[in-house]
Image (cartoon, rainbow, N blue to C red):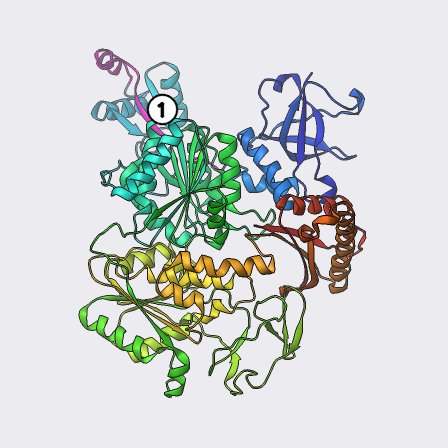
Amino acid sequence: MKYAGVIVDISGGKLDRVFTYRIPEALADRLCVGMQAEVPFGPANRRVSAYVVELSDSCAYEEAQVKELFGIAQKGIAVESELIRLAAWMKEEYGSSMLQALKTVLPVRKSVAPVRKRRVSWALPKQERAAFLGGVNPRRQAAQLRLLTALTQEDTLPYETVTQKLHIAVPTIRALQEKGIIRVEEENPYRNPIAGGVGRDQAAVLNEEQQYIADSVCADDQKGIHKTYLIHGVTGSGKTEVYMSLIAHMLATGRQTIVLIPEIALTYQTVMRFYRRFGDQVSILNSRMSAGERYDQFVRAQKGDIRIMVGPRSALFTPFTHLGLIIVDEEHETSYKSETSPRYHAVGVARRRAAMAGASVVLGSATPSMESYYRCHTGEYRLFTLKQRAVREAALASVEVVDLRKELEAGNKSILSRCLAQRIDERLSRGEQSILFLNRRGFSGFISCRSCGKAMKCPHCDVSLTLHRGGRLICHYCGYEEAAPRVCPSCGSRYIAGFGIGTQKVETMVAKQFPGARILRMDADTTAGKDGHATILSAFADEKADILIGTQMIVKGHDFPKVTLVGVLAADLSLHGSHYEAAERTFQLLTQAAGRAGRGRLPGQVVIQTYSPEHYSIRLAAGQDYESFYEEELPYRQMLHYPPVYAMMTILFASQDEAAAGRSARAAEALVERYIGRWKETYAPDRAREPEMIGPCDAPVSKISDIYRKTLYIKHVDRRVLVTIKNGLESLAPWKSERTDVSVQYDISG
């Protein structure tokens, strides 16, 4: 007798465990791990859905206590048991319920109605058809005669043509089919979100740097060595050509590849490059596809009809059975981090899935994350570098840094500096294109001085203070607060305030200053439709606009040969964000923005507008000098015990009752303090490595939709220590005694 362990598809912490059911004899050979079943649940034995996570021949309970499951869900989809194991690992590593983890790794839980195509054709041999037609009675069998006559003229007919245009009833079709006169063939053509065809582009000839990387990774693979590799290549250095060379190797050895890209905005341009090379072996997954399209790609992947899947982080869970390679392009991007439980990072999960499948992981970026570059230095990853652009004529763009403090002194209060306005005018006169990038990432209500550039920072955490109602500046790491100053404490200037501007306002002002310019704007409003990104990017690529205005989505990975100018309107918006990664994110954005200019044969130019031109992240981004930035940034992380040197866990407590959220955070604080106390007793000589706790305090956004949010931060050099603390908090969960619901989320970085 066999038993199934299942996770019931009902939200609630008490149900987040495995329940055992007896498998009916009729299903003993059909039920598999990963299938969706229907089971009797609770005293009333109501029918609920459940995921099968384990099968066993033995049971820990008495036979009389074990209920029998009803059956396999009619629209349930079996997934690889590997994905179930991956979900269990994510639950442990990132903190969530098992059900939340399962729903994350199962890209589609239910099928949708398939697109059915049926065709009617002769089943009789050609030599017998005339004789059969001669025996049909024209008066009593007119419908049959009409159908067979039409089939004599056309070998096959669409089923809809037969029923709707020839007006043949279904019983007539069925009668001829049962007699073996005709056949009805059915096919279910899968929805394909990209056009059909075969690859047309030939493999590019790799340069020496590119070929060395491809040869090294392939040589390791042939020896059965599977590692994580980081390709650090300047913008335009041809990382994608290396990716395609590695994919071709995987295809030649019968294996499959997942290619992760950070933004849905990149999907169209990136997918088409892969598609032109590999044809119908490529498909995509993303959140804007219809349920039917997503389901079809899932099934195609399971059946082996596609061998390359491209998409954002959800594509990581493609049910490939012969996975050989996972590529994470622009691996530094924050969109690879999930904002819902489990708060996983795609790079970490990619490495785990690759280890389970015996696959390799290739990360690529012009501005690698501090974590990835640090792991190269510790020997955890292997580092490759591409120092030259793939197109030899395409030199890196020249960069001008404009000090907005001097613009203010000169009386220019426009969003465009005099230098940038002049450069735009030059491009318009030459018929070239410009990109204006509004750096809004990290904007969180900081205030700074327009005269000297000083931002108000926490004296304890080296992050910007955030302006709250009532004129209070608050640190969202330690809770430090002070009154917002009326004049700059550094230079005494009255020009001290927050900074806020949107893309619509930029568009209006640019249109007013350059009335003849054709302008496109790319932001959340203009890309709300399913194909919003592709429509705007295609129009700009087809030179239907002179200026493209947008936020960070316009500076990531796009390749427009006619773009010779990139203007960064406000570098300080991310530089002074209230996060320890503010300098890193600013450097990455500015370097990526600079990389959009001069990618063709025309020279490129970049203008960076800032109130802090002396800051190392802006100064080094202007020179696209990543190594120097890393060397300057790392000591700050070491001194303040931030990732990548330390791991950090953020625990978020959320409730409609602010007091309940606060009590839960303080209860967790008390438990962690007890853990730290035991740690000190055990590891007294090694006090430098003991866990550190900061908070609790308000979250960076302390209230969303009437939900109050509190945070607690814990740091340690060993990530496993934080996972142990998380497990202890999950098992004790003192907030469960609260009458008001309090939700808890864990986020472990580093």
Task: Name, please, the residue furthest toward the front.
Answer: 685
Q: Quadrant of the N terminus?
A: top right
Q: Compared to 280, does 126 lie above or below? A: above
Please tell me which residue lies in front, 258 or 575: 575
Q: How many marks?
A: 1
Examine the rendering and report whether any part of residue 67 can be seen.
Answer: yes
Q: Residue 352 at x, y = what percent?
A: 53, 37
Q: Compared to 543, does 228 lie above or below? A: above
Q: Compared to 13, does 152 lie above or below? A: above
Residue drawn where x is 74% and y is 45% of the image: 728
Residue drawn where x is 57% and y is 57% of the image: 638
Q: Which residues are magenta?
A: 112-137
Determine if the magenta segment contains residue 416.
no
Secondary structure type for disc 1 = strand
Task: Name, please, the residue furthest toward the left.
Answer: 430
The local crowd at label 1, few if under 14, some if 14 to 19, many if 20 or more residues have their Cα within 10 Å, is few
Q: Is residue 596 left or right of residue 440?
A: left
Q: Is residue 131 left or right of residue 65?
A: left
Residue drawn where x is 48% and y is 35% of the image: 354
Q: Compared to 269, does 424 lie above or below? A: below
Examine the rendering and report whether any part of residue 108 can be seen.
Answer: no
Please tell me which residue lies in front, 661 or 614: 614
Q: Which quadrant of the view contains residue 181?
A: top left
Amino acid carrying label 1: it is Glu
Q: Residue 202 at x, y = what percent?
A: 22, 38
Residue position for label 1: 185
Q: Which quadrant of the view contains residue 54?
A: top right
Q: Residue 563 at x, y = what percent?
A: 26, 62
Determine if the magenta segment contains residue 116.
yes
Please tell me which residue lies in front, 534 or 653: 653
